[in-house]
Amino acid sequence: MSTEQGLRASDLAIRFGERPILRGISARFDKGQVIAIVGPNGAGKSTLLACLAGLLKPDAGAAILDGTPVAALPGRARARRIAFLAQTPEIAWDVDIRAFVGLGRTPHLGAFGPSDGDRAAIDAAIAAAGLEAFVDRPITRMSGGERARALIARALAGETDWLLADEPLTGLDPGHALDALALFRRMAHDQGKGVIVTLHDLNLAARFADRVLVLSDGALAIDAAPEIALAPEILSDVYGVLIRRHAGEIGPLIEVLGRVG
Amino acid sequence: MKSAKSPWMVCGVLAALLVVLFGVSLCAGRVWTPWSAWISHGQDPRWAIVFGLRLPRTILAILVGGALGLSGAALQGYTRNPLADPGALGVSAAAALGAVLTLYLGAAGEAHWILPLAAMVGAGVGVAVLLSLAGITSSIVTFILAGFIIQTVCGAAIALALNLAPNPWAVNEIVNWLLGSLADRSVEEVKLAAPGVVAGGLLLLTLGRSLDALTLGEQGARSLGVDLSRTRLLMAVGVAMAVGSSVAVTGVISFVGLITPHLLRPLLGSKPSAVLLPSFLGGAALTLAADVLVRMTPAASEIKLSVAMAALGGPFFLAMLISMRRRLA
């Protein structure tokens, strides 16, 4: 048995009907890093993430976690190792925040309901997302930003090695977006977890990611450190916009000038 | 909805209510049977009323009401749709069709278990069709439409059976049975219904966690490690057994499954697992209370329980519709 560590996409390909969404993507993801996946709408970011999380079955290739295909893991075992945060999550019932965050413990629960360990993990997740004041509040009465934080806390509560988050910053104001990214960095750098996020904001990707994957039309355009992957030539090509990179206050600033042509 | 009471406390209160109703149910009816008649060991003729008629009827009300309440709560959790109900979604109609076919073909007389089995198969087919018609989405509209289709088709098939019935007695038998009621049921009916209700109910009670995880939608539930095809199968089998064996002995009684979880959510919160067991107890209490009232109504012939339930459920449904419209507006 191989002693391979980490999460790997091996020649992942998937099509929805006639339309290819991913055209053979291979990439390695290591723990201890925040890895951003960027690319235009429809480039296949969400699909790639769902394949890595074992929620979509690729037509060819495989997602491989520590040497084992993710698809071969039993659901519960997989859920204890990979937390997935959907882009437009459904919230069907008006449960309070504590119960909602507690859903993240589902794969850990024993036969007799939540243990002390489960409760401690829920408390820690609520604290990490700064939701202590809202524990009894029904989730439908939270603002968009508070709800986004509750979703992140739900994913944290599972205490997984991997967090795969699809557009987790949607609906967050700049302050809370920074908080969330700082939280992801702490998870990766201090706790040694692997964090993979899809992002639309290129400046936040440049500032917070250790590595950036740029997807273009279902293929991997580049997989490199942010300063290399987010070069203006590459981005102009992939997004079809004119881009200039300035020296900003705290790092490079990516400015979108307009459409190409 | 803010502070959810302990589920065990609510269960305890409901159980106590059920015990009280149990006692009232044994006493109440055309003939009032006081406690002294119960302990007369056959000396008092009213003893036969208590143990031959009212005891089986009471137990049956608890079993059937519980099965319907629990099935409603489970269906609402699975579909994430607060309007789900075995009656409204056509599952009861499908069970009734299965049972009517055995009555029509005369097979019900062959062996006592044929009718409940046919009702369970009918309910199973109904749930399977429902989940496959609407399973991919959780849209309220798709579910209601799918239920409407099942209800219409099954209703038409039942009407056809009546239409083609070989003799007026068969028609009479079918119609009488279709009008859901608990009147004149004996220990035999209890024996027929109990296994399916208990087994199906226990199956549904195991689904709490999967239903909770479905709060996050199908993808969310799968990302939490829930095996949805297994959940769907257990759900279909559980509802089929519980509803099928209930319909087999009492005919179609609607609205219990719709109303009960709604009355309990303000006490227990909206988490699907929190309302499952209380919905069994609550559905049992509601049905038993309704049956006691039905027995007490001064009418030439007893009002059917299904009619009384519909009279209660219709306005309830209306009130819900109005409040949902207000929320959407």
Image (spheres, coloured by chain):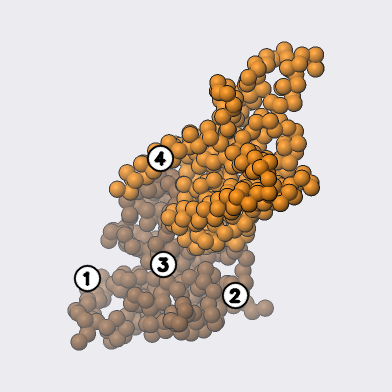
Chain colours: A brown, B orange
Amino acid tagged 2? Pro
Q: Residues within 10 Å of mark 1 (few under 14, many from 20)?
A: few
User: Measuring 44% from the left and 40% from the top, which residue is drawn there?
Assistant: B317
Q: Is residue A36 visible?
A: yes
Numbered disc in front, either 2 or 4: 4
Which residue position is annotated with label 4?
B318
Which residue position is annotated with label 1?
A249
Q: Looking at the rendering, which quadrant does residue B326 occupy?
A: top left
Which of marks 3 and 2 precedes in the sequence?
2
Amino acid tagged 1? Glu
Amino acid tagged 3? Asp
Q: Nearer the viewer, residue B206 or A165?
A: B206
Numbered disc in front, either 4 or 1: 4
User: What is the residue that sits farthest to the front in this orientation?
Assistant: B167
Q: Chain of mark 2?
A: A
Identify the element where label 1 is drawn: loop
Numbered disc in front, either 1 or 3: 3
Q: Residues within 10 Å of mark 4 (few under 14, many from 20)?
A: few
Which residue position is annotated with label 3?
A166
**Split into 4 quadrants, where in the image is the C terminus of chain A?**
bottom left
User: Measuring 48% from the left and 84% from the top, which residue is drawn there?
Assistant: A24
Q: Is residue A225 left or right of residue B286?
A: left
Q: Is residue A159 left or right of residue B99?
A: left
Q: Residues within 10 Å of mark 2 (few under 14, many from 20)?
A: some
Calculate the distance from the C-alpha at mark 3 to the C-alpha at mark 4: 40 Å
Where's residue A203, x and y in %?
A: 29, 72
